[in-house]
Every structure is written in C-alpha cells, then in structure tokens.
Amino acid sequence: MRATATFLAIVAVLATVACSTNPVTGKSQLDLLGEFQEMALGAQLYPAYIQDSLGAIADEALQGLVARTGEAVARVGHRPTLPYAFAAVNEPAVNAFALPGGKICITRGLLARLESEDGLAAVLGHEVGHVTARHAVAAYSRRVLATALLLGGAAVMEAKDVQGRELITLGAVVGAQLGLAHYSREQERQSDRLGLEYSVAAGYSPLGLVETHRVLLELQKSQPGLLARLFASHPMSSERLAAAEAAAEALPADVRGREKRVESYIRVVQPLRAVRPAWDLAHEGRVLLAQGKKREGAELLGRAVQQAPEEGVIRTLHAVALQQLQRPQTARSEAMEGARRAPGVFLSRLVAGSLWVSEDARASLEQLEAAEQILPGVAQVSYLRGRANETLGRRDAAVAAYREALARDPQGEVGQAAVARLKAMGEA
C-alpha cells in the first residue's frame, strides 16, 4: 500500500511540474518534452519519415511551391521562429502530416487532387496548426504519463500477486497506445480554425479550406482506399466541411472575395496530375501485395509501369512484386532501372542493392552505399553490405558490416541474422 501511494505521489508531482504554456490557447498544459527536445526529435525523425513516404518528389518547381506556401502560413502563426521544413513526397495515398518542431510533408496523392494554391495553404496551415498547438507534444506527454501509470500498476499487481497480471498489463498498454495514437476531433477542429486563420493572414482565399474538405469528402466516396492513412490521424466529416463554410462566410466580404490562385498552381502540379492514374494503380498494387495477393498486385504494378515508365519508384515497387513471384532476373533489371530513375530514394537503392547481392556483389555495394548516404543507420543496409563483401572475399569488411548491423538492431531479426553470419565465420 505504501509503494502504491509513493508511486502515485511521484506521478502527481511529475504531472504538476512538467507543464508549459500552450502558444495558441495561453493555457498551461502537460509538457514532458520541452521545445528544444521537440525540435531535436522532429529533425531526427524527418529524413526517415520522408523516405518512409517513398522519398521526396524530384521536382524543384513543386518543392519550391510547397516550401514557399508553407513558410508563408508558418510565419504568421503562433510559433514563427521554429525551423520549419516542408516536403512533397512520393506517397500516392492522400495524406499530409506534421512532426514535432515543424517538419511537415504532403503527398503527391493529395497535391495532385487539390485545385489551387489556396487549398495547399489550407492543408499546410492545418498541419502548422498541429505544430503551433503542440498536439504531438500533448500526445507524447500523455503517452509517457500513461506508460508510467501502467508500469506502476504492473508493479503493484506483481507485489500483490494478481492473477493474470501480464495479460491485464498488455491489454492496458495496447489500449493506451490506440487511444493516444490519433488526433482528437477537437484537435482537428482547432487545426482547421488555425489553418484558416494562418492562410487568410498570409493572403490566401478562405475558400481554400472549403475546397480541401470537399475534395476529401468526395474521395471518401469514390476512392476510400487512398485515404486510409489520412483518416487514421485526421478524422474527416461533413461537419468539418460545414464548419469551414460557416467560418469562411463569417469573414469580411473583401477577404471572401479573394481570387483563388488556380492557374499558377495547376501549372506546377500538372506533371503529377498526368501520372496520377499510374500512381493510383501502384497504390492498389502495394495494398494487394500487403494482403498476400502477389499475382494481382504484380499485375497492377506492371500496368502502372506501362502507363508511367519514367517513374522510378513505381519500377522499384514492381521489382519487389516480381521478386515475390520468383522472377529474379526480371526483378533485378526492374530494380536497377528504378534506382537509375529515382537515385535519391532510399527504397529504390535498397531494393536494387538487395537483389544484386548474389549476382553482382560490386553493383550491390554501389547501391547499398548510396542507400546509406540517403538514410544512415539502417541495419538491413549493413547486413546486406556484409553479404556483398563476404561474396567478394573481403572478410574484414564483411565482419565489420555484420557487427554494425548487430549494433543497429541488437534484438531484431536483422541483428540475429548478422549474429548467425558472424558465427558461421567464426567471429562470434
């Protein structure tokens, strides 16, 4: 009983002292991260999130438009001095997301469907709103506190020898993670309001937000599969559209009457629109592969390649599908073409490097070294470099690479595979 009281007292003190003033509301909120750590965390995660979204789109004009629009809305927000960064990524699903500290991405799937720069400003303003209101920080703080409570509860149950305590604790942890993983509806509404406020303050039409909600709701009816990731973190509803329409209508006539920036936006995103059908097919193919439907997924990805043969990432995804169908020669050829056409995408380099390990170890190493430069620290890259060096008879380089893989993934499958190779070489 004394241990329980002591633990709860510690948690109560932690919740009381670890607070900060929210920049948007001016109210005190639980803050177990701090602004410096918030910025550092976002900067650390950003490269991996970009590559997890299939890399940045290789289009300087498009990246410039996204960056200029994002900076315009961020600089009139509640935290204008944050080191914001904005990137357009190759993910074909419709999505946009913000990391702590102002690191923001928007996908080609959404960019190709927006109708104006004002719509883009509304989307980016919404994501900036999540950052300025510190929604991710609040979720992190709740998660840490919930974990502390769960661990404390587990300790109490163990002390009292509660039957079935392992399953109780596991269920509580899973429940807490699910409950804290998404933005709440109130946070979404707040970010909508902030996105409208910031985009209007930056000189854009308030109808950009209305346009965005209409596009998303129409997609929800026609192509819901493209919205799965967006809806997981940004719940959509007709109520939010109605709120956006009412908020725009309440603004002064001269603000409501601002002309939307349509032609300049369409001119920049036209290349994305031209290949959108191919990327939609690629998205469907990836979903089928994830469901274990290899042949169907490969067929759709093959059709996507036929429609847009210049899109290197689609070639890479097709190579993965071909490899799953036990067609290694064609897969290797497609993978190398993918890497050639998408040299700055980690996945393209990794797939090319992995498929060439046994066939041409030197070509494999070249691709893997490029992958390491794009996204350092990935255990799989180290392991594959070990295999390639082992094939080439470079024992010392292989051992060093395997040890690096183990250090990067000491408890995971890649790390254990590295241990197996080291044992086989008499080095473990």
Image: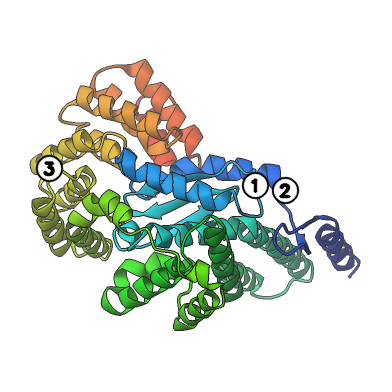
For badge 2, the amino acid type reads Gly
Residue 412 seen anywhere in this rendered image of the structure: no
Q: Is residue 338 or residue 158 the one in the foreground?
A: 338
Q: Is residue 34 or residue 63 the one in the foreground?
A: 63
Q: Residues within 10 Å of mark 2 (few under 14, many from 20)?
A: few
Residue 189 seen anywhere in this rendered image of the structure: yes
Give the farthest residue toward the front: 254
Quarter-wise, where is residue 384 in the image?
top left
| Tag 2 secondary structure | loop
| Number of disc labels | 3
| Tag 1 secondary structure | helix
3 vs 1, front mark: 1
Mark earlier in primary sequence (3, 2): 2
Q: Position of residue 425 (x, y in %)?
A: 35, 25
Q: Residue at x 77, y 62 (%)?
A: 26
| Quarter of the rendering occupied by the C terminus | top left
CA gap, disc 3 and disc 1: 44 Å
**Disc 1 designates what residue?**
38
Q: Residues within 10 Å of mark 1 (few under 14, many from 20)?
A: many
For badge 3, the amino acid type reads Pro
For badge 1, the amino acid type reads Glu
Q: Is residue 163 or residue 400 the one in the foreground?
A: 400
**Disc 2 designates what residue?**
34
Q: Are marks 3 and 2 in contact (CB under 8 Å)?
A: no
Q: Position of residue 339 (x, y in %)?
A: 22, 36
Q: Are marks 1 and 2 in contact (CB under 8 Å)?
A: yes
Q: Residue at x 36, y 49 (%)?
A: 89
Q: Is residue 319 or residue 156 the one in the foreground?
A: 319
3 vs 2, front mark: 2
**Disc 3 designates what residue?**
328
